Image: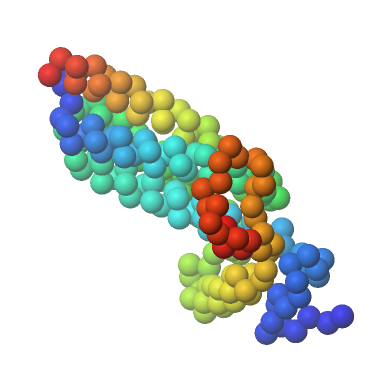
Amino acid sequence: MTIRQEDPVKMDALDPANGLNMPEMADMTFAADFLIRVKEGVRSTAAALTEAASPDVRALLRAQLHQGLALHQELTELMMRKKWFHPYELSEQYQLDRLSADHTVAIAKQKLFPDDTRRQGLFDRTPDEGLEGSRA
Amino acid sequence: MAYALHETLEVHELAAFKTVCMTKSKTMRALVSDPALKAIMLLDVETSARQLQELCSILERAAGEEVRL
């Protein structure tokens, strides 16, 4: 079986061919998510620091801001070393972003779960009793 | 030492954000296969846990003051 490049995830979710390069792609996604969280942490700590008046709060937030910046540096260096992140080559980064966007769309189109997800008898009451099957 | 109300709220929001981040790092670390990324995530979990304790100690002191108001 050959996999066409323009349609990377064309089979059903359980096909092992979909697992090709999956650990690397998953790690890339986790790293990107981690980077977003670290960046947001630095920003909100800095914003909170500009609102702080008490000296001990200022000192604490200042220390945490520095720790956040150090973490960001470490993560950015790792991502650049792993070629997950190309801040200097815009076209490379664009290709990578396009690829992951295509993958995400392909995964979103897949049917990952069965229609009927009722937890029959697991709860003491059924909140959606009037609905049936996939609508429940 | 008295804390301003807006200061307390800011610290509270930061603590809520850090809690979510730490939980996410902790749970996602199990799915990561790259050892270097795993190590940084573990570092983040440890740092965040310590930072949360620091933020919580400020919130506790602020709550102690609130009772006197």
A30 or A75: nearer the eye?
A: A30
User: Which image quadrant: the C terminus of chain B?
Assistant: top left
| Image: B4 above or below A14 | above
Residue at x 36%, y 26% (from the top left corner): B56
| For residue A107, side relative to residue B22 (left or right) | right
Number of marks present in the image shown: 0
Residue at x 24%, y 16% (from the top left corner): B64
Outermost residue to the front: A130
Where is residue B11 drawn, in percent x and y? 29, 35
Residue at x 65%, y 40% (from the top left corner): A122
A12 or A39: nearer the eye?
A: A12
Where is residue B29 drawn, in percent x and y? 62, 44
- Residue A109 placement: quadrant: bottom right
Outermost residue to the left: B69
- Residue A8 placement: quadrant: bottom right
Residue at x 24%, y 36% (from the top left corner): B9
B61 or A31: nearer the eye?
A: B61
| For residue B6, side relative to residue A104 (left or right) | left
Where is residue A41 drawn, in percent x and y? 39, 46
| Image: A106 above or below B47 | below
Q: How is the image coloured?
A: rainbow
Is there any visible trace of residue B27 in the rendered image?
A: yes
A71 or A108: nearer the eye?
A: A108
Is there any visible trace of residue A92 in the rendered image?
A: no
| For residue B20, side relative to residue A110 (left or right) | left
User: Which image quadrant: the N terminus of chain B?
Assistant: top left
Where is residue A120 drawn, in percent x and y? 67, 47
